[in-house]
Image (cartoon, helix red, strand yellow):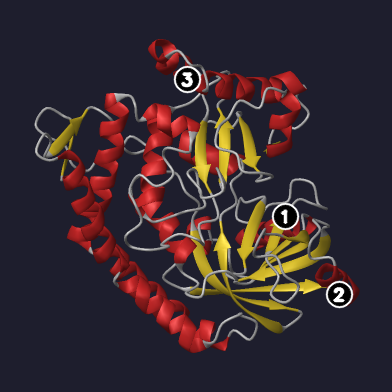
Amino acid sequence: MHARLAHWIAGIALAGGVASEGAWAQTTDDLFDASKLHEIRLSINSRDLTQLRAQYDQNTFYPADLVWRGIRVRNVGVRSRGFGSRNPVKLGLTIEMDRYTSGQQFLGLSSLVLDNLWQDPSMLRQFLAMGFLRRTGLAAPRESFTRVYINNTYQGLYAIVEDIDAAFVARWTGDAEGTLFEYHWRFPYSGEDLKELSAYAAIFEPRTHVRDPVTTLWGPIQDLFQSVNDPDDATWRSRVDRFLDLEQFVTQAAVENYVAENDGLLGYAGMDNFYLYRPSGDTRHRVFPRDKDNAFLQPDFAPFEGVDANHVMRRALAEPDLRALHASVLARCAEVDRNEQWLRAEVERAVAVIRAAAHADPLKPVGNDQFDAAADELRDFGRRCSEFVTQSMLRLFEPQVSSFRLPVDLTSSGRQSERGGNGELALAL
């Protein structure tokens, strides 16, 4: 009876395009297990692969089969991805499981990113930055590392990156019905009022509810940035709070500054590399991070870098409690690296997993000596950054303030690890 049931279940899986060979217990936790080096094999028609490489700057999908740990997903959609990392040599790839087969999923995922790690000699920066964001309680994609083969030819070391989609949002917020926007950098934008709905539509691409009316999709975003640029300081906070979770925005911006990310919310060329999310039945947006391969730029990255240029952040830090929150988050980040040596430990673990595959990567744009040197530089980054940020904050706030106590939850899921006797989070400088 049990054998007949197993055979029947296997038949259903095959009919849906997903074949499994002893892999029923696998979950997304296994896929994003960064303690192991994974292997993903893609099979693509040779003519399609030639076309994919020739037109790498386009978002054209091609059919392929994907295999991971004995699970074969047939007829997935594969396209080139990336901005500065796009190239025809070592392809960055987005994989959509349901592109050609409606409803098809892989371990419950509808899509997946294979990051080619092209812009980072260490191949570790995004993995570490996203891990640090999660360590502070912020929502950030999970990642692991994999060897990628296309038509049985080794393409090199890649990162498996959780796509930011409705499933990701639901896992972090419990809300699967809201509207998710991917921000696209078109020009330096720092939160100015763009006046026209069409201007917001050009940079905020809906990933859900794509058929909603124009005013429904982008009207609340227009309201958000109109409120941000309202000159009345007395009503600014109450107006903006209706359209943006300011505490979450300030917290994420602070953590991004701590990891020396100069291409994020407070980027050198304006805002970049984020998603905007609006919960169902609400107008209050929040942000999610993406693409952090430019993080860890330098350990003496200024804690307030980019604040003055960003219309949201500049006005937010004029509010005493938000300024204190920003300082507290930076202090907590420094404390994590100082007390746990978090970054060094994560670098050591990751290098042990990926070094052989990285050295064997035939398509990476740097040599093995450069990879080793870049990884070595990151080992000591946490200590140096922690010292710099701590000293910077002391210079800014002493002798008036030596610690902050805030009734503010610094994690997106309600978890707090250190509380004072009155239930407030204590973050000592």
View extreme (right): residue: 47
Q: Nearer the viewer, residue 85 or 418?
A: 85
Left or right side of 165 for 11: right
Q: Is residue 240 above or below residue 103?
A: above
**Whether residue 302 is situated above or below residue 88 in the rendered picture:** above
Identity, as a three-letter code, of the amino acid under mark 2: Thr
Which residue is more in the foreground, 346 or 318? 318
> The disc labelled 1 sits on which kind of residue?
Met
In depth, the one of 341 and 322 nearer the eye is 322
Q: Is residue 381 above or below residue 313?
A: below
Going 17% across and 35% down the picture, which residue do you hit? Answer: 404
At which x and y percent is residue 134? 39, 50
- Residue plotted at (40% across, 73% down): 350
What's the CA distance linking mark 3 and mark 1?
38 Å
Mark in the foreground, 3 or 1: 3
State which mark lies toward you, 2 or 1: 2
Q: Quadrant of residue 377?
A: bottom left
Residue 97 tag number: 1
Q: Position of residue 13 (x, y in %)?
A: 72, 57
Instruction: Answer with the quarter of the image where residue 66 lies.
Output: bottom right
Q: Earlier in the sequence, mark 3 or mark 1?
A: 1
Instruction: Identify the element where label 2 is drawn.
Output: helix
| Foreground disc of the pair 3, 2 | 3
The percent coordinates of residue 5 (x first, y second) are: 66, 57
Q: Amino acid at mark 3?
A: Val
Could you tell me how far apart the alpha carbons at marks 3 and 2 are, in whole angstroms? 49 Å
Horizontal and vertical percent for residue 381? 31, 67
Residue indicated by mark 3: 240
Residue located beneath label 2 in the image: 50
* Side (left or right) of 207 relative to 30: right
